[in-house]
Image: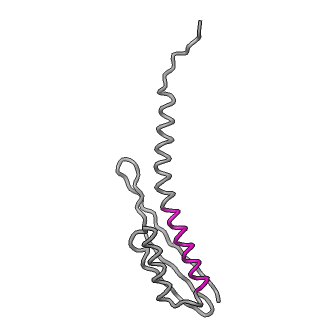
Amino acid sequence: MVNRRGATALGCLIPLLLFAAAGYVAVGFGEAYFRFYKFQDAMSQEARFADYRSEEVIQKRLVAVADSLGLPTGADQVTVTRTQGGIRINAEYDEVIKLPFKKEHVVHFSPVAQGRF
C-alpha cells in the first residue's frame, strides 16, 4: 500500500505566485535602469569626444539617443557645460514604473558624464 500525506498543490502555488509577482516588478525596474545605463553610456561617449564636437551637436545627439531609448520627457533637457580643460554633461528625468494593483512608483534618474581634454 502507498503512503500518501494528503497534501494539496496549493502549498506550491503560493510561492509560485509570489515569484511571478516579484519577476513582474523586477522587469519594470530592470528596464528603467537598463535605459538609464544606456543613456549614461552615450553621455560618457559624447564626453570622450567632446573636443571634436560643439555643445549643440552633443545636445542634439543625446536628445536623439533619449528619443530612441524611449525615455520620458525631461531626459531631452541635456545640459552641456564646458570648463577649463573639461566638460560636464547631465540630465534629470523621472521614470514611472507600473506595479501590480494599479500602483505606480516614480524613480528619479540623474545621469552625469565628465571628461577632460
Image: magenta residue range: 32-49
Q: How is the image coloured?
A: one colour
Residue 71: percent from left, percent from top: 43, 69
Residue 102 horizontal side relative to residue 69, left or right: left
User: Closest to the observer: 112 or 53?
Assistant: 53
Q: Is residue 94 magenta?
A: no
Which residue is found at the position 56% from the left and 83% from the top? Answer: 88
Q: Residue furthest top?
A: 1
The N terminus sits in image quarter = top right
Q: Is residue 48 magenta?
A: yes
Which residue is found at the position 38% from the left and 72% from the top? Answer: 73
Residue 20: percent from left, percent from top: 48, 42
Q: Quadrant of residue 117?
A: bottom right
Is residue 103 positioned above or below 78 on the image?
above
Which residue is found at the position 47% from the left and 51% from the top? Answer: 25
Is residue 106 positioned above or below 64 on the image?
above
Number of on-image labels: 0
User: Closest to the observer: 79 or 47?
Assistant: 47
Is residue 55 positioned above or below 76 on the image?
below
Residue 17: percent from left, percent from top: 46, 38
Q: Residue furthest left?
A: 102
What's the magenta bit mostly, secondary-structure-wise?
Answer: helix
Residue 112: percent from left, percent from top: 55, 76
Q: Residue furthest bottom?
A: 84
